[in-house]
Amino acid sequence: MARRKPNCRIRKGTATIELAVCLPLIVTLTLGAIETTSLISLRQKLLTSAYETARTASGPMQTSSAAITAGGNVLTARGVNGGVVTISPDPVTAATPTGTEIAATVTAPVATNLCMRPFVLNGIADLAVTVRMVRQ
């Protein structure tokens, strides 16, 4: 009596079905993870630029243009496209004495700074980071 393999014909297409079900999920998770880490990296670049802007603006005898230039240089060095640096209040005016809190805000568009076209985080237009320091 010849022996045959049990359930050989029944399980022939199982791997194909499992791949068809799991592959879209695996690809979506992988691309979503890449996009999320790219967004976190962009936020860190903006945070570094805002910190440098606030540090420069809070120093004694500093101008807002010097602080904005310092923040812009960090954005350029980090490869951020379309970043905007703002300072509030202006550290040059006499109304900002020592001890005043100065806020530096850096904003950049998300779509032009991610490594791929946003598909998971498509609803986020701009990313903004604010750093506050006390004027010395």
Image: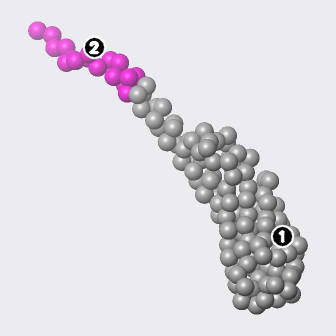
Which residues, given as a range, are shown in magenta?
Answer: 1-18
Residue drawn at 73 percent across, 78 percent down: 102
| CA distance for labels 1 and 2 | 71 Å
Front residue (pair 14, 39): 39
Does 114 sit above or below residue 46?
above
In this picture, residue 64 sits left or right of residue 116:
right
Q: Position of residue 79 (x, y in %)?
A: 77, 57
Q: Dividing the picture into quarters, in which one does residue 12 lie?
A: top left
Front residue (pair 112, 1): 112
Q: Residues within 10 Å of mark 1 (few under 14, many from 20)?
A: many
Residue drawn at 82 percent across, 65 percent down: 72
Assess whether residue 59 is covered by the magenta stretch. no
Residue drawn at 42 percent across, 32 percent down: 22
Question: Which label was assigned to residue 9?
Answer: 2
In this picture, residue 135 sits left or right of residue 63:
left
Question: Which label was assigned to residue 68?
Answer: 1
Residue drawn at 73 percent across, 59 percent down: 107
